[in-house]
Each structure stands twice: as C-alpha cells, then as structure tokens.
Amino acid sequence: MSEISRRSLLAGAAATAGLAAVGAARTPARAAAKARVPVTRSQERVVIIGSGFGGGVTALRFAQAGVPCLVLERGIWWRTGPNAETFPHAASPDKRMFWLGSTPQIFGISADPFEHYTGLLEQVAGNGMDMIVAAGVGGGSLVYQGMTLQPTRDAFNANLPEQLDYTRMDQVYYPRVAQMLQIETAPDELINSPTYQPARVFAKDVQRAGHPLSKIPMPIDWDYALRELKGEMKPSYTNGDCALGVNNGGKHSVDVTYIAAAQATGLVTVATQHNVTDVAMTSDGRWEIHVDRIGTDGTVLEKKIITAKALVMAAGTAGTTRLLMRAAAKGQIPDMPDGLGTGWGSNGDRIYVWTDLEDDFGDPQGGPVVYGSLEWDDPNTANTVIQASLPPTGGDIRSTMIVGYGVSKGRGRFVYDSGKDDAVLQWPKGADDTIYKRINERITKIAGSLSVLTDTTGAYPSTWHPLGGAPMGTVCDLSGRVQGHRGLYVLDGALIPGTTAACNPSMTIAAIAERATDDIVAHDAGTVF
C-alpha cells in the first residue's frame, strides 16, 4: 500500500470512528410533494429547543418544580437494548449516520449521498473550522465517547467567571451530574481482556514518557461490556463499535437519564422530528417558535407556530447561536446584545491516528475510553490526552486513536450572511496553536519514536466540542438569562466562553445548567413564566 493511500485509509478510519470531520451540506427540509402543508398554532408555558445536556437538565428541574415544558427535538429517538441494531456501524455507514443532506467521506473517498434521513451527525461548515453536531433525543450524549471530567478549581476560575462559585459547583452541582449519569471507571477484568490491548499499550507508554495516568470516569454500566465478554450479547463495547452510539445499551446518555426522569413527572412532552426554523419575540413580549414537523426523509408534514411565556435555547452552540443571530439580523428579536456570536472556542480538540510499529494494537479494539493523561498543573495550558478505540476494520492496521484537548485561548465569532440567511463561524488561522503545540509535544512523546501520527484535525479542521456564541457575562447572565429579554434563556454550550478548562464540555454544561435552573426556578417561575 502506498503512503498516500495508507494515510487516506487511516484518516478515513478516524472519520468513521466519529473523530474527524464528515462532509455535509446545510439543506432545508423538503416540503411535502403535491400536498398542502397544514399550519397549526398552539401555546405553551415553556418551550425548550434541544434535548441534550442543557435541555435535559432544564426539562427535569423545571418539571420537578411543577412547570410543564415542551421539548422540541429535530431528530428521532434512538432506543437501545441488548443485541439491538438501532445505531449504524462505523465500518459500514448507512443513512442513519448522517443528518439530512449529508455527503460523507469514507476512507478518504467521497461517497454518493445516502438518501435523506434524520440521522445522527451534521457538519456545520465555517470559515477555518467546522463543527460536528448531533441530532436525536439526547443530543451529543448519543455519540460522545463519554469522558466525564470536572475541571480543577484553578483551571475553572482562570477560564470561567469566578462568580459561578467553584466551591458550590464542586460540592453541589458537579456531584449532582455525576449521580445522574452514574459515572464509573472501567474494571480491571475488562481492561485485561484481549481486545483492550490498545488501552494497556497507552498506559505503558504514558508512564514510560513520565506523564500522569488515570482511569477516566464514564457514564457506562460496565457490566454490559463484561456480559459481552461472556458471550451473553454481541459485541458493542468490546469491539469498539460504539463511536456512533452503543447498540447494547448501558450508556447513561441524556435520553435515558435526564429526559426519562423528566417525562416520568408527567409534565414534559418531547416532540421529535420538530425542526425549529425561526424564533421571534411577539409584540406583547412572548416568544414565538416556528417549527417544521418533518418525516424521516426531511419532508415537511406540518408547520407549527408555538407561542410561549419562556423560551430556553438548548440547541447546542451551533443551533442556538445561529437561530438567535438570524432572529436578530431580521429584526425578529430586537435589541439583542452586541456580543451575540462572539466568544466561540474549539475546546482545543486535536485528534490523531496513532500507528505503532513496535506494539500491535490489534483488531478489534475494546472501547470507548479507559485511560487518560491529565496535565492540569498550569491552568493556562492544562490539557488531557486519551486513547480511544477504532471501530472494527476487518484487518489489523496497527493503529488506534489518540486524542488531546485543552484550554483553548483562541476565539472566533459568527457573522450573519444575508445571502445564506445563516450565521457562519469565522475562525482565525492559528488561533489555538499554543495549546495544539503542547498537546502535540505530549502525544509525540507518549507515542514514541517508532510510531507514525496522522493529524486528522490538521487535515479536517473541526471540533466535536464547540463552545460559545452567546457567552455568559457578554450576552447572558450566569444563569443564562439573555440580557434585556425577559423569558429568553440560553442553557447549553453556547453559554460557555470557549473552553471547559481541559475537560470534555458535557459535565460542565450540565453542572452550569443545574446551577442555572436552581436560580431560575427560585426567581422566575411563577413571575416570568
């Protein structure tokens, strides 16, 4: 195999593992053919756009306070269980992998588009950096690896507003999230099993390089993986076929934790295949949400106009920021804060395929993540390096994934493009070079001299961890209230100013949403809504 084709293969393997960009085009939902689309109107007390960490936390805590909520989710339910075939397989992609209008690249080769489907992943194109976002009940928790990390006090305070009060976050809100997600580290019995050779090699090489090593807390019931070892269900964890969702279950994603608990109150309705196209403020100060109810092929079946006393934007950094900027640019929400669209960061993502000429990683590889190396002493350059499994490839390519992320100081911004009627991310070239350099130094030392590292982020500049766009302190207060706009809240990654301090964003987004909903329930429920 030539070096060029080998590198294409490895980069493609990273893409199918859910760790590099997939090409996509932003396409509107298709109107129902030869049929008039009905338009309906309704009123709600609270509407939440999005069902990921921010939306899930909000739905549960509002409902527990007696506040009924309607959750709008553009994607579908992805229900799992032993031996299920709910999620697509990374090694054999199909229409379930991609959101409407996607054009994937698999193994470095452009493929014809799959038929339109309300699938899992969408690439939101920017200038200089793309964002990979998820669709479905549970949002990004459906496809994230699951690393559940809490920043140190120093890193938190250096990169997020100190007024959030780290002591209370540490004592109340981070533990609350950990309990909801039932986080635990992988048992040694699993780590010592044959397919977890890459985790053992990574641990050995981290220690040889003189870097710290620790197990990574994950929202996983590892008994499912142990049952796979015993042949009680087909592999999902133990062969690394979990980058696009875990078919067997056992992963405590938002749909089976926060959303399930919210629905159990009887006060939360989750409306799937409800794609929000616009938001606006009415003349009497309420919130108007324009929604396309779509089929799984994207056909518009019904147009809805929903009016609410309170609107919670939890559509993810890309979704929330773009909806609000479009509304501001078109005068649908007047007097939005000038900082809207700013404070965007990549969380310092850097993703490599690691080919080791000395140690054989094997195929298949157990996953998703077992160990990490946390270099957190300096809050300004704090970073984390982890090893993640490749999906089964059908042949041993002596490669696995090695991933770094850290304190991202670079900032981009969204700019509204009237021709596209969309806000487009503008990312300065080299904005994250400082943290990238440190991550690359560490990964190179860990991999050793007999390894080849393929930088997929360099080939496909993208992030799975976009943050900012409506940041606290600039657009919102610390509880997500949009300045000057009663009843409008941002409670997702858009609220976070660019970095979660060398940690995956999920735990911090959820913990800040927990803090915010405590405040909103105490001061706004019954008055604002």
Image: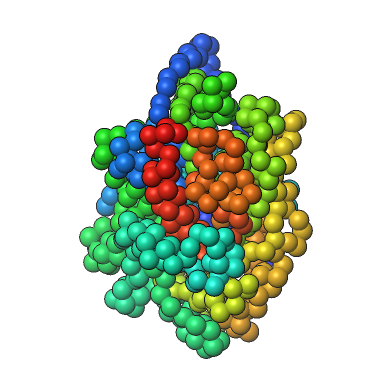
Q: Is residue 484 above or below residue 493?
A: above
**Residue 114, percent across and down?**
54, 38
Residue nearest the observer in this picture, 293 or 468: 468
Residue at (46% x, 54% y) in the render? 512
Horizontal side, residue 72 vs residue 156: left or right: left
Nearer the observer, 254 or 446: 254
Please provide percent x and percent y for residue 152. Answer: 49, 72
From the viewer's perspective, tell me whether residue 153 is left or right of residue 323. Answer: left
Report the front residue among 229 and 433: 433
Instruction: Report whether residue 278 is seen.
Output: yes
What count of labels does the image hold? 0
What is the quadrant of the C terminus in the image?
A: top left
> Residue at point 50% right, 35% down?
487
Q: Is residue 142 visible?
A: no
Quadrant that contains the N terminus = bottom right
> Relative to residue 275, is residue 167 depicted above or below?
below
Residue 22 horizontal/vertical position (percent): 60, 49
Q: Is residue 301 left or right of residue 455?
A: left
Q: Residue at x 35, y 45 (%)?
A: 61
The residue depicted at 57 percent of the width and 60 percent of the height is: 161
Q: Quadrant of residue 381?
A: bottom right
